[in-house]
Image (tube, rainbow, N blue to C red):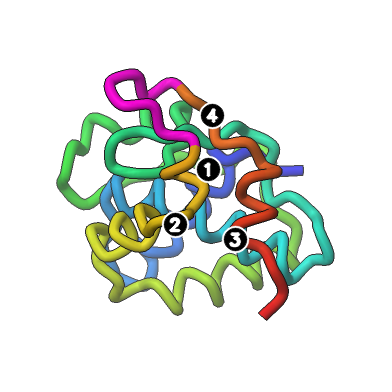
């Protein structure tokens, strides 16, 4: 299984290849929504097992945030190769997912993640930002079959 960092590296490189920009903030939200969509489309498999935290501006995987924080709010221009390359089926999923969100603004994803009753709201502890969003919250509140 790939880590969140592997998935992030794949997504960043894909966006670079198709000449679309992605910031660290947008990447964080993409990881969150990719996890949800993958779970729903794969009959309950996790895209990655890394914890997702409830930070002020929404769901964040801290390891990925730290890797790309040097870009601040600027588009990420370089990415490392994933250590554990996603399998072909996962790559196909990630490319299709990335294509759907390529023109979505980061703040639109933040607003979506901050909607009342969503996992972020239930896990966020004002002023701390170190609260993990339990996967059970995400599954129960975001992963119902459409």
State the mark number for residue 142: 3
Q: Left or right: where does residue 31 sit relative to residue 143?
A: left
Spatial distance from mark 1 to mark 3, Cα to Cα?
30 Å
Of the pair 50 and 22, the residue shown nearer to us: 50
Of the pair 123 and 100, the residue shown nearer to us: 123
Disc 1: which residue:
81
Could you tell me which secondary element the residue under label 3 belongs to? helix
Q: Where is 137 relative to 65, above or below?
A: below
Residue farthest toward the front in the current orientation of the protein? 117
Q: Main secondary structure of the magenta part?
A: loop
What range of the chain is rendered magenta? 123-130
Q: Where is 116 relative to 146, above or below?
A: above
Could you tell me which secondary element the residue under label 2 belongs to? helix
Residue 52 horizontal/vertical position (percent): 53, 36
State the mark number for residue 30: 2
Q: Where is 127 relative to 135, above or below?
A: above
Spatial distance from mark 1 to mark 4, Cα to Cα?
27 Å
Spatial distance from mark 2 to mark 1, Cα to Cα?
18 Å
Q: Earlier in the sequence, mark 4 or mark 2?
A: 2
Q: Left or right: where does residue 31 sit relative to residue 55?
A: right
């Amino acid at each position: 299984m790939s880590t969140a960092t592997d998935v992030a590296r794949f997504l960043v490189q894909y966006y670079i290849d198709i000449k679309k920009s992605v910031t660290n903030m947008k990447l964080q939200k993409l990881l969150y929504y990719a996890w949800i969509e993958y779970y729903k489309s794969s009959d309950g498999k996790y895209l990655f097992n890394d914890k997702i935290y409830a930070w002020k501006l929404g769901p964040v995987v801290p390891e990925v945030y730290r890797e790309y924080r040097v870009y601040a709010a600027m588009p990420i221009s370089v990415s490392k190769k994933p250590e554990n390359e996603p399998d072909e089926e996962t790559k196909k999923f990630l490319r299709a997912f990335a294509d759907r969100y390529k023109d979505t603004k980061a703040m639109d994803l933040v607003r979506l993640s901050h909607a009342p009753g969503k996992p972020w709201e239930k896990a966020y502890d004002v002023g701390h930002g170190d609260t993990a969003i339990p996967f059970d919250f995400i599954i129960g509140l975001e992963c119902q079959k459409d």
